[in-house]
Image: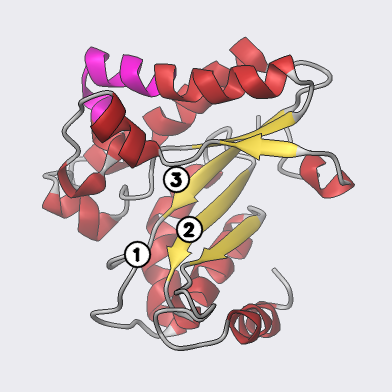
């Protein structure tokens, strides 16, 4: 059973940490090859899985040692249908669904290892954009985005994931679709936008306006 899905402890105002730069660290520090920047692909080998554990343990230990909370963000930024297809994963054989399950199972293992009363550990299913996370080649409607992301988010709903976090969202319609899919699946959701140096999304939308648009379209989901 999910531990915090009904009440996320970070909403009580305490300090929570999370990891940062997973793909960069795995490639340049640990020497892994990540096709399409897909960290979840490492789950297919013992060496890759051990590499992911080493990466997350460094961060989780910092949170535990300093008595603060931690958000365990699954390595599933690229584990959605289009990106999975590029990497040879298929929903018809459940390979991509299995990879998403394995990614959350890894976070559950780390929570058992590091969580304490002073350092609660929340498990988040990471969702990435259908396209590139830093530029826009094609845009979906809100309904198309909801249908696309519902696949991966629906898998998270059947795991120990406490929440969903969508990162590097480049335009509001996709963020709205993710939020609606998460709400339909009964999962709290966080949206994180890519911004340029002028504070605007790659779509040209101002960050504040984008946040308001998503909140307005999803009743603050």
Quarter of the image where the C terminus is located: bottom right
Residue wearing tag 1: 133
- Mark 1 Cα within 10 Å, few/some/many (few <14, many 20+)? some
Residue wearing tag 3: 155
Q: Which residues are magenta?
A: 42-53
Q: Residue at x 60, y 37 (%)?
A: 18
Residue 173: percent from the left, percent from the top? 47, 82
Q: Principal SS element in the magenta part? A: helix
The quarter of the displayed image where residue 213 is located: bottom right
CB of mark 3 within 8 Å of CB of mark 1?
no
Relative to 35, is 134 above or below? Answer: below
Relative to 194, is 14 above or below? Answer: above
CB of mark 2 within 8 Å of CB of mark 1?
yes
Q: Helix, strand or loop at disc 2?
A: strand
User: Is 23 left or right of 58, judged from the image as shown?
Assistant: left
Q: CA distance from mark 2 to mark 1?
A: 8 Å
Residue wearing tag 2: 167
- Mark 2 Cα within 10 Å, few/some/many (few <14, many 20+)? some
Q: Residue at x 50, y 80 (%)?
A: 198
């Amino acid at each position: 059973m999910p531990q915090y899905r009904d009440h996320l402890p970070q909403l009580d105002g305490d300090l929570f940490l999370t990891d940062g730069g997973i793909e960069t660290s795995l490639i340049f520090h640990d020497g892994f090859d990540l096709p399409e920047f897909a960290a979840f692909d490492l789950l297919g080998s013992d060496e890759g899985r051990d590499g992911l554990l080493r990466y997350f343990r460094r961060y989780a230990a910092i949170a535990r040692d300093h008595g603060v909370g931690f958000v365990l963000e699954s390595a599933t930024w690229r584990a959605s249908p289009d990106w999975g297809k590029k990497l040879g994963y298929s929903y018809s054989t459940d390979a991509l669904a299995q990879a998403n399950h394995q990614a959350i199972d890894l976070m559950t293992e780390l929570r058992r290892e590091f969580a304490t009363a002073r350092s609660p550990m929340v498990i988040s299913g990471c969702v990435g954009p259908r396209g590139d996370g830093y530029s826009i080649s094609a845009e979906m409607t809100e309904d198309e985005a909801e249908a696309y992301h519902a696949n991966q988010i629906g898998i998270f709903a059947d795991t120990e994931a406490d929440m969903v976090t969508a990162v590097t969202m480049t335009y509001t319609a996709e963020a709205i679709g993710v939020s609606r899919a998460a709400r339909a699946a009964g999962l709290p959701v966080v949206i994180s936008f890519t911004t340029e140096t002028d504070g605007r999304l790659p779509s040209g939308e101002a960050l504040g306006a984008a946040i308001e648009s998503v909140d307005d379209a999803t009743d603050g989901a």
